Image (cartoon, helix red, strand yellow):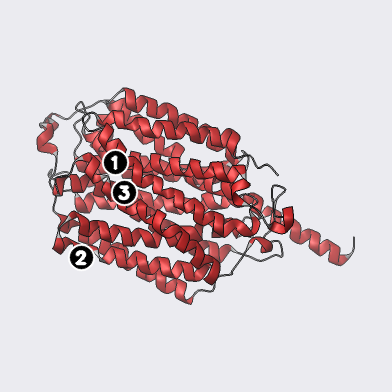
Amino acid sequence: MPVTQKRKYTMTQKAQSSLFIGKNGENYLFPFILITSLFFLWGFAHSLLDVLNKHFQDSLHLTKAQSGAVQAAAYGAYFLMAIPAGIVARKFGFKKGILVGLTLFATGAFWFVPAVGINTFWAFLIGLLVLFAGLTFLETVANPYTTLLGPADKAASRINLAQTFNALGWIMGPLIGSILIFKNNSNQSILELFIQALKKVFLGLKDISDSIPLEDIKAHTENSALIAPYVGLGIMVLLVLAMFIFAKLPEVNAATISHGESSLESNANGNIVLFKQRHFVLALVAQFLYVAAQTGIGSFFINYTIEVKEVQLSEIQGGLLLGLGGMLLFAIGRFSGSMIMKKVKPGILLGFCALANTLLMLVVTQVHNRFGVMALIASYLFMSIMFPSIFALGLTGLGEKTKTAASILILTIVGGAIAPAFMGWIGAEKMNLGFVIPLVCFLYISFYGFVGSKVRN
């Protein structure tokens, strides 16, 4: 074998064996590491919403359905800004899209300071709308960017690995948010409260000192408690913004990566009509329903847990179960998912995880006791791989249409704006009944994983 041919063969082998090597030998590891910081930040911001939902029910005396406006403002921003974000990414490149996103992100976070002074619901909703407009830019850019930083056949593994850092943010959000926002009316430490909550839910144990009427357990909080977590988040965003200003990011595109056999780019010189790609169209529905399910579950997780009379959890304990219970499983699932996908096809894994969650939601809707709480916590393990898997499967083989397709997929996040209000309305009297909505969502996602995600040339 000639030396030149041998070198090409070695380079091809290297590209196929690494998650971050392009077809010409480019190493994309550093850009990938930098991008993962964004995944952490928006995970933190997203999971804070689950604490805000219950907080505003107490501080502003909102109904469950009314508190769904928190998610409507946040996820509505995706619907409003996804297409503009896609246009910016196409015209000005990935880096400028990220800089715009981080600027809006920081502005929305710092807005919470004057919003506390105004102290009306609409003021906080404006801050969330601006903050999540920034996240729309970041997700429109970062998700497809990770799929392009290496071989196409490893795109699902790469985005799941990046989303592991997103899951760490999801853990920290409710954990820090619960500590700073909900009042701890007991003399116990946070760790003691968490262990006590685990004993109640998983062992059915109850401390004698814990026999307090449920209405006395509920903590009423002030909106000034929101300043610390959001100003702290804003400072972190500014630091990351400074890093991106001075960093050099490669403007990779579909032509610079090594493609697997499933690529459709060779068809008609890459002139793909997106809405004729069945796997992409079905991915739009799947992603809409997934975000609806995840947002709905997170929004009313605390409500569901503290309404279980046999365990009598406080709001801060419900938040700790969400952060250190559900979200920890979420992070474990993200990390293990990227490993499992090296052996199992992403579509098959997605189908099984969605089917498992369909059964868990059946338990949640049928019983409103500690076993329902266990099922709710366990659902986060199986939700973990869904968003990045649907995203990667939907973008498979779209070539030069990847950025456009990504911005359209980001539009589907508006599902999170709709589900909480419906769940709050259905579960106004019995919260467990509201979880029929994520049950139906997971049933469709299972179909997409097993059948709908297959690429047809």
Which residue lies under the disc numbered 2? 113
* Crowding near the residue tagged with mark 2, few <14, some 14–19, many ≥20 C-alpha atoms within 10 Å: some
> Residue at 58% across / 33% down in the picture?
450
Q: Mark 3 or mark 2: which comes first in sequence?
A: 3
Q: CA distance from mark 1 to mark 3?
A: 8 Å
390, above or below 212, in the image: below
> Residue at 27% across / 43% down in the picture?
320
Q: Are marks 1 and 3 in contact (CB under 8 Å)?
A: yes
Outermost residue toward the bottom? 246
Of the residues tagged 1 and 3, which is closer to the observer? 1
Q: Are marks 3 and 2 in contact (CB under 8 Å)?
A: no
Of the residues tagged 2 and 1, which is closer to the observer? 1
Q: Residue 382: give its label.
A: none
Q: Residue 71: give its label.
A: 3
Assign the C terminus to one quadrant of the image: top right
Residue 117, horizontal then vertical, whole percent: 14, 64
Which residue lies under the disc numbered 1? 421
What residue type is disc 1 on? Answer: Ala
Q: Mark 1 or mark 3: which comes first in sequence?
A: 3
Residue 204, horizontal then vertical, whole percent: 25, 25
Let me know if residue 194 appears in the view.
no
Q: Say which quarter of the image contains residue 294.
A: top left
What residue type is disc 2 on? Answer: Val
- Along the horizontal axis of the image, is 425 left or right of 152? left
Let me know if residue 251 appears in the view.
yes
